[in-house]
Amino acid sequence: MAGRGCGKRRYGETGFEAWGGYMEAKKSKLENQFDNMPDKNKEGIFKNISIFVNGLTEPPAAELKQLMHHNGGTYHHYYRSRGERATTHIIASNLPHAKLKQHQRKLVVRPEWITESLSAGRLLDYRQYLLLPPENPLLSCMGAASTSKADGGAHVSSEVAGIGAGAEPDYDDDDEDCESFPPDSSSDDDEVGQKSDPEPIADNGDECDDSAEAIEAAGPSTAVPSAANSAPAPPTDRSPVKRAGQPNFLQEFYQKSRLHHISEMKALFRDYVARLQDAPDDGYPERARLLEWSRQRDQSSGQTTERDGDDEEDMEREPAGEDPLTAGDATVIAHVDMDCFFVSVGLRSRPELRGRPVAVTHSRGGAEPAVRPGEDRAAEADAYRARRSGKSAGEGGGGSGAGGKEPSWMAGGLHGSMAEIASCSYEARAAGVKNGMFMGAALKLCPDLQTIPYDFAAYREVALAMYDTVCGLTRRVQAVSCDELFADCSELLRQTGVSPLRLAEYIRHAVRRETGCPASVGLGPNILLARLATSRAKPDGQFHVPAGRAAEFMLDQRVRDLPGVGRTTAEQLHRLGANSCRQLQRLELAQLQRHLGPRTGRQLHEFCRGIDTRAVTPHAPRRSVSAEVNYGIRFGGAAEMTSFVNELCAELQSRMTAAAFLADSVTVKVMVRAAGAPTETAKFMGHGVCDTLSRSGRLATPTDRLETLRREVTALLAALHVPPSEVRGLGLQAGRTAATAARGKPPAAASVTTAPPPPPQQPAQTSAVVYSAEEAARLVGGVDQPVERPPLPPVPTFCGTADLSCIRRLVVEWLGSGPRPEREDEAALAVYLSALVDARLLEAARGLLVLMGRRLTADGPPQWLEALQRLTETVQRRVGAIHGGMLSLPALPRPRANVTTATSAAAVVTAV
Amino acid sequence: MAACDIALELLETILHSVLYLRKLYPEAIFRKRQKYRIPVHMSVHKGVNEYVSASLRALRPYLERRLLESVSVVVTDPAGRHSETLAVELRVLDAAAICARDDPCLARLEASLSGLLLGLSATLGDCHPPPAGSTFQLQAAASRCLPESLDAAAEFPLTITDSAAPHGPTAAAEDGPGTEGCSVLPVRSVRNELFALEVTLRRPTG
């Protein structure tokens, strides 16, 4: 009997083969019918949109079909996944779980998208109407959403659209540990090397903490405001917000962290510029356009009279007054900086918000979030204040009460939203809102502040267009970040004969043409002055500081605006009586160096006079790669921390691979809850007030191997003795010295891991005899003299026996023989272990060490642990001498007290 | 010399096992064979077998004159970096010992060799194999060069590695810029009447 399992019935020829089968033919027929319906409107807001309606919708499918028909869209009776006429959107109000799963990777949009687009008279952003987000693992299991018939769709979509919906208590202590540099100056740490610790664990560096606010977006907050009255459970228990240590935490964290995206883009553009240097010359297409544009300008403003404005205006807006550069002129650096980048990119698709105060943030400024148990903002603020005042008092200057300052986030009151504003428009700035401010505080200053979400893909696209434009003029470009770059325009100006300000004007014009976003351009004889000129040029302007006027220009600059001067340094300088560069110039070099260190002192001494020797470097090798997380870290135990550390190591390693980076040192940075800080932070899952501990270790050879990194990191972390429950942040940084950098590989595309595996290799055609260089020289000369190998030592004995199982028993007995090992016994064992290595019985030596390591636990008697450590070092030294390497051992227990030996194993090797 | 025959047979078995265990060739070209009373994987691919056996034949003169110090499988990852080296350090102790064909001696020998192969599969099975697409090279270290083996007219000419033995065991003690800092994992050591043999897996630290 032909049951169900017997497979498809085979039909004979149906006559539809030519159309690709019956169903294909039917679909095509229906589409043709639709296309050929009378009075079809080909042009309309739904041009190029084709929908497929699934299930009952409001308005119903027939009506949607009519709507599409009259407005240029296409209506599909069957879902088409492929082809040039594929369905672009599925329309549904409500989907059963099975279909939710089925359509996970497709765009499922609520019908309101169509009706509201129609009433708005333009195609609205469908993302606001998604029924379920494409490929969002967080929300993919939303059975509940579809079962609640009444508001299911709407509820889900609000959760979706509001990645970051709801007022989320965010917390950021930007101000705490990253005081030395303002956010934007971190970007050139690599080149300047002005800090002792070059790149403060890149990915979050200065701007660290907030990197996380994204995750809480999908967090419990959406539900909390309404449910808050009925006893809220501790968020860690039931929240879908992942904690570190849980699977996929890192992946999700980095997916949503804006700082991760920013730093990724920075690396991307550095690489992009570096690769451009090697690309063949394309004749700088933008230069021709510049000349053409410049000519037109000349014609149109040919009648302009030479104005005698004051100098300021002259420098700012009057390009005609300037002479083109001549060959003898000094360099001109341009600093191109997009104006409130995130906002202006976001406004491209939201023209209705132009001219209004707008902020880019995860928060949407909803109701005030519920207070979580354990959260105590007042206490946290106290801890914060105490710390600030302690710090400034400790720094030994008669601090003028700056210590007692409120943390910025308290401005939002005890309950305001702590989502951070990444960027805000000039209209919002006029109301006092600043970048980095919290939503709670910002809303108090500017109640009608509009918020728009992040759109990283668009940022990338716009940034690329900006880079392309500038690189079309000159390739002497240094990428600073996604919205900021330096370009050395000296050659360009000489070649084209255009005046600097006209060039600046053209760059702004071209950037706006390509991206639709405003940019400001500052020009100066060096990087410092170009950057300072930009801050004068903003918003949407240009400013040139000619070399001759640099000194005069510098006098009025604020000390705070100098690169490298953060809050701490500014406070120190304030105590020295220097708030402006004019005042700073009066200070002696020695005085500065005494207070700020030799390097920073010298640099400030030069900077305040407008001297900056840094050159525009298109290709600066990376000095460090890092991965850091300080959000969502609440370890339940040591095991969770270990697994998270492993995950972070893997992340670091994959970043190193992507950057073709070999490290010779590793730094572990741990943020630990400060004594007195509340356990639950004001910012949900944030890190609160913390002490930061860090420790570095050197690696024996430059490497990007996961095992090495993991071992080193584990050892360093163990040496810090941090209780897992108190950890609030963890960062890893892999660094390399200049010498290693030179030996490192050239940057490669990150395709190493994705390359398809090659077919089985053919064996090499020859085998090879290997010997040392001097032997080669001697032997190839043809001198045939016998070479004696040193005789192999006999199998060594221990306590009169050579039998290994016997010796293992003896060693185990010895370990239990007393509170401390006898010196003689230890020495005898050391001799025996070395002899084993010499007799090429390394395996036996290793076996004994591992045996001892297993017997002694980390909390065992420290004398024994020290003995084991000495024995291990003896063996390692022998192995180094004979095999030229380091015996690979599992982690042996280390004595607690001796934390500084965390890297001793590596040290032994280098010593040998 | 009997000892040389045994040593070469053992080396051949070790090399095949290493190719299998380090996944340098697809599993399909290997078949289970019994050696020293235990199952091992040997290649049935003609080209591979020929390469291994010809290399070993070319090394025979070195072994007979006790010049051979070690034979290594040097694995290079697709990016051209050294991935790992499996080094077999070998000395023939007494070439004549085996001539007395007494059973206890042979039985002990067999036991030690099967122990070696078991240790090999246990240890190498636990280590991550080199990345897919890696290539390998057989390298041998000798205390002296036999000019005839380098002769292009020889059946299977050897070449001198110009890389000055980046990871070979002998060069390590003297200089070798890349050698310090590699991690040495002992796989198995064997010492019997015939020869002393130590197998180690060296990797750039990690």
Image: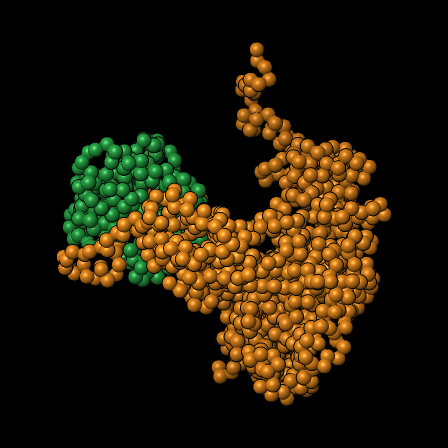
Residue B155's spot in the image, x, y percent?
Answer: 18, 44
The C terminus of chain A lies in quadrant: bottom left
Q: Colour of chain A?
A: orange
Q: Position of residue A306 (x, y in %)?
A: 66, 84
Q: How is the image coloured?
A: by chain
Q: Residue at the location (58% across, 82% down)?
A: A593
Q: Is residue A359 visible?
A: no
Q: Mark yes or no: residue A844 visible.
A: yes
Tell me: B57 left or right of A471. left
For the view shown, which residue lies furthest in the top direction?
Answer: A1
- Considering every residue shown, the one lying at the far right of the view is A229
Front residue (pair B168, A165)? B168
Q: Colour of chain B?
A: green
Give percent across and percent down for residue A343: 70, 61
Query: In this rendering, is residue A487 above or below A64?
Result: below
Q: Does A292 sit left or right of A760 as displayed?
A: right
Counting the numbered discs, the total is 0
The quarter of the displayed image where residue A381 is located: bottom right
**Who is closer to the viewer here, A552 or A220?**
A220
Question: What's the residue at 33%, 53% (across, down)?
Answer: A835
In the picture, measured across the screen, residue A589 lies left or right of residue A366, that is left
Residue A266 image point, x, y percent: 57, 62
Q: Which of the 4 quarters of the picture holds residue A34?
A: top right
Which quarter of the image is occupied by the N terminus of chain A? top right
Q: Residue at x 17, y 48 (%)?
A: B65
Residue occupying the point 56% across, 28% down: A19
Asked if residue A524 is positioned above or below residue B111 in the image, the reply reads below
Q: Is residue A182 above or below residue A67?
A: below
Q: Is residue A820 left or right of residue A294?
A: left
